[in-house]
Image (tube, rainbow, N blue to C red):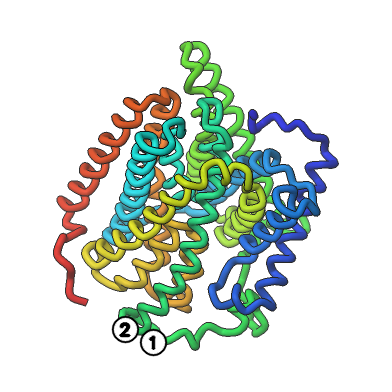
């Protein structure tokens, strides 16, 4: 299905978003009163998505949320989220912290891809000879890159024979979230018991408000500033409108690139191009932000309001992504999903525990937990876990994570295109070539990392 072609009338689309809105509120209610969710700090959007999945047509059938429509919503919400990311920052910070964070991030993508491919190769040679080998490449998309990207890219592979690819992407992303919050909180408690934490000695500082997802005490956190006069325009409207303009430019740019590919008879690359529309949107957003900055009008874009916009799109993305999981598709692929998930999660955890004590000068355990939370969930889940260890975000870990994530994305672009090319060919030989190319690419960046003196292979004293 073309993500820009929706076979539904406006009534259905509006009702879908009203239902998703209701489940965001139900998730908030569940977080407010259910101790289990409070203990593990599970976000409201994730809870709401699970409730929608249970009540939807795949299980109880109480509500009619079509997984195919939800995948389309996720596709567009992903691009809007990345556009907000590009618009909100006026500068980029380099240095050892952000660079080592980015190297850990790209290492995670590559490790998860190798795990997924290795398991797929073994299953094809043993009990599942007809398995789509590219399923192994969905592991880093779901674990490391989140539900929106996993659904978008894996969904674009369906034309190459990957039946239910988008739902498989959402499933891996959901499993990743479970690793992030449940294993992540377990790691925090273990770190406290073994005295590995730098700032806290227990979890008593986690207030009831934080566990319930509320703010009772004043002063409340500030959402942002108002760079436009409210008698002229609502500042939040201005920011949303700017996001809309960038998305229109993104659509026109991708449409133009598509025509160039068709003129060059490169039709196989068209779907890959539309699958990576969020990257083009991010680049255009960065360019627009730069134009505002160099013209002396950067003050008109408030990072707080743009972050709130990104949070809005991300909440709907997550609740829609989890609700869009297909139980039927899980049944088709339960064995590879189970094996890959059981290996990829612990492998990611052990790799970060190794590297964080060798690639950073400070706050090793805090960086370990943040990386694990991000590379199995999202940057949001990582910050939730980090706030348990660093309640006031006084350490440089959060800032390094934000800047390093952007670096990781750009370093990972060749990997994303490599995945698309291998899947388009969909031959065992192509996947083996990709497998060894990933190893070579990883070795290259580890070599650069070491030559810069930012990582040492002997554990540092803490």
- Residue 214 % position (x, y): 65, 76
Q: Which residue is drawn at 52% across and 42% down?
A: 333
- Residue 291 % position (x, y): 51, 42
Give the structural element (helix, strand or loop) at label 2. loop
Q: Nearer the viewer, residue 9 or 77?
A: 9
Residue at the far front: name it: 127
Q: In which quarter of the image is the N terminus?
A: top right
- Location of residue 410 (image quadrant): top left
Q: In this view, does 22 lie to the left or right of 254?
A: right
Q: Which of 248 and 39 is in front in this view?
A: 39
How far apart marks 1 and 2 lie (CA) works out to: 7 Å
Tell me if residue 333 comes above or below residue 20 in the rendering. Answer: above
Q: Residue at x 40, y 27 (%)?
A: 421
Residue linked to disc 2 = 195
Residue linked to disc 1 = 201
- Residue 22 % position (x, y): 77, 60
Characterize the local packing of mark 1: few (<14), some (14-19) or many (20 or more) Cα atoms within 10 angstroms.
some
Contact? badges 1 and 2 (CB < 8 Å): yes
Q: Which residue is drawn at 21% across and 51% down?
A: 449
Q: Which residue is drawn at 35% across and 27% down?
A: 428
């Amino acid at each position: 299905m073309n993500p820009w072609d929706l076979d539904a009338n406006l009534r259905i689309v509006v009702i879908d978003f009203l239902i998703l809105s209701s489940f965001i509120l139900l998730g908030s209610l569940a977080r407010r009163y259910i101790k289990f969710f409070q203990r593990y700090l599970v976000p409201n959007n994730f809870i709401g998505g699970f409730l929608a999945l249970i009540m939807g047509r795949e299980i109880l059938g109480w509500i009619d949320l079509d997984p195919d429509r939800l995948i389309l919503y996720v596709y567009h919400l992903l691009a809007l989220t990345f556009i907000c990311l590009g618009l909100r920052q006026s500068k980029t910070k380099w240095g050892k912290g952000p660079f080592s964070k980015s190297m850990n991030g790209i290492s995670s993508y590559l490790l998860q891809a190798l795990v997924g491919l290795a398991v797929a190769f073994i299953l094809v040679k043993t009990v599942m000879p007809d398995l789509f080998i590219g399923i192994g490449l969905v592991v880093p998309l779901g674990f490391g890159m989140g539900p929106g990207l996993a659904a978008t890219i894996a969904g674009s592979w369906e034309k190459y024979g990957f039946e239910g690819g988008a739902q498989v992407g959402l499933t891996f992303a959901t499993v990743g979230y479970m690793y992030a919050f449940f294993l992540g909180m377990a790691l925090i408690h273990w770190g406290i018991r073994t005295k590995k934490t730098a700032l806290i000695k227990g979890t008593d500082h986690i207030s009831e408000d934080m566990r319930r997802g509320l703010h009772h005490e004043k002063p409340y956190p500030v959402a942002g500033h108002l760079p436009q006069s409210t008698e002229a325009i609502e500042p939040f409207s201005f920011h949303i409108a700017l996001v809309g303009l960038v998305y229109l430019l993104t659509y026109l740019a991708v449409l133009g690139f598509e025509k160039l590919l068709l003129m060059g008879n490169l039709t196989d690359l068209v779907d890959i191009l539309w699958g990576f529309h969020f990257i083009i949107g991010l680049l255009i957003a960065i360019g627009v932000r730069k134009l505002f900055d160099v013209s002396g009008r950067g003050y008109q874009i408030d990072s707080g309001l743009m972050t709130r916009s990104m949070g809005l799109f991300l909440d709907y993305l997550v609740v829609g992504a989890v609700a869009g999981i297909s139980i039927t598709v899980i049944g088709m692929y339960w064995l590879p999903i189970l094996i890959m998930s059981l290996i990829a999660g612990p492998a990611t955890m052990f790799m970060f525990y190794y590297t964080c004590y060798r690639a950073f000068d400070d706050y090793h355990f805090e960086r370990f937990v943040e990386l694990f939370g991000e590379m199995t969930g999202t940057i949001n889940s990582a910050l939730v876990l980090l706030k348990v260890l660093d309640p006031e975000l006084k350490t440089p870990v959060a800032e390094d994570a934000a800047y390093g994530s952007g670096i990781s994305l750009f370093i990972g672009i060749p990997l994303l295109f490599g995945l698309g090319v291998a899947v388009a060919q969909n031959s065992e030989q192509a996947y083996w070539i990709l497998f060894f190319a990933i190893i070579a690419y990883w070795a290259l960046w580890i070599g650069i990392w070491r030559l810069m003196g930012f990582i040492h292979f002997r554990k540092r004293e803490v």
